[in-house]
Amino acid sequence: EVQLVESGGGLVQPGGSLRLSCAASGFTFSSYEMNWVRQAPGKGLEWVSYISSSGSTIYYADSVKGRFTISRDNAKNSLYLQMNSLRAEDTAVYYCARVYRYGEGVDGFDIWGQGTMVTVSS
Amino acid sequence: DIQMTQSPSSLSASVGDRVTITCRASQSISSYLNWYQQKPGKAPKLLIHAASSLQSGVPSRFSGRGSGTDFTLTISNLQPEDFATYYCQQSYSTLITFGQGTRLEIK
């Protein structure tokens, strides 16, 4: 079964750090680009970061640039998000999502994890 | 960044109805537009990619249209399981953006 499972969420104080993990199974992880998407309580979806299949190309949303770092370990079939200098507004469910390329530049997030909750509060 | 604006923000309808949700981009995104469905406490589910291509396994009562800046998601013959929140998302830019969501409720 194709699956993504996030872990590492929890309660952290403002200014603190947290590292999220996303374990992939059921597909060739090293062949797929990946993203992190978050959703604050009662709010909509916000894209956070992208990483190419090799890890050589990375993008961030302006809201997290300079504070968050996306990475992957293809040998371990795992995606990571290192979050530093956390703020109250980073409180959200964090999802990892696989990019599926349909061709001619078209793509979508076809597989999502169940999400992990991050709460930033004192 | 490309801004995505959905309308309406919420919508009430009955089983069997036909509803349309609109998504407008702040600049042309060609057909690089996806639609997702999200139910409470669950991860989003990809319904439509490239504005009008139905994802495998998605019922044919879902359809998408549009290109450039204006897009629509239409659900025909609403079923009880369709009541959820719907999001559009542009993949034209490397900085991905989502619409704010449209909550579809039972009347």
Image (cartoon, rainbow, N blue to C red):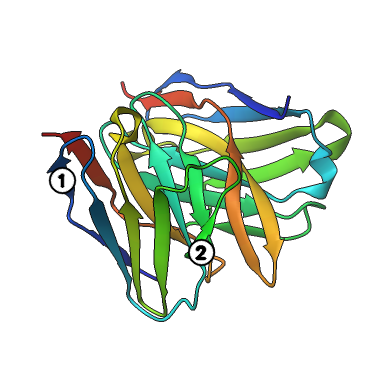
Q: Chain of mark 2?
A: B
Chain ID at mark 1: B
Residue B7 drawn above or below residue A99: below
**Residue B99, how many percent across, how many down?**
33, 56
- Residue A68's x, y, as percent? 55, 45
Mark number for residue B11? 1
Residue type at mark 2: give it. Answer: Leu
Tell me where residue A75 appears, x and y as whole percent. 89, 34
In this rendering, the label closer to the viewer, 2 or 1: 1
- Where is B5 relative to A114, above or below? below
- Which quadrant of the structure image shows residue A39? top left
Secondary structure beneath label 2: loop
Q: Would residue A62 be visible to someone looking at this image?
A: no
Q: Secondary structure at mark 1?
A: strand
Give residue B94's position: percent from left, percent from top: 57, 66
Q: Which residue is mark 2?
A: B95
Mark 1 neighbour density, 10 Å: few (under 14) some (14–19) many (20 or more): some
Residue at 44 percent of width and 24 percent of height: A117
Instruction: State which tag comes first along the sequence, 2 or 1.
Output: 1
User: Which is nearer the eye, A49 or B78?
Assistant: B78
Q: Tell me the residue at 33%/64% (across/down).
A: B72
Q: Quadrant of the N terminus of chain B?
A: bottom left
Horizontal arrangement in the rendering, residue A54 relative to residue B17 (left or right):
right
Residue depicted at 73% across the width and 24% down the height: A1
Q: What amino acid is labelled 1 in the image?
A: Leu
Question: Circles 2 and 1: CB distance less than 8 Å?
Answer: no
Marks 2/1: CA–CA distance: 29 Å
Residue B98 position (above or below residue B106)? below
Residue at point 22%, 34% (across, down)? B15
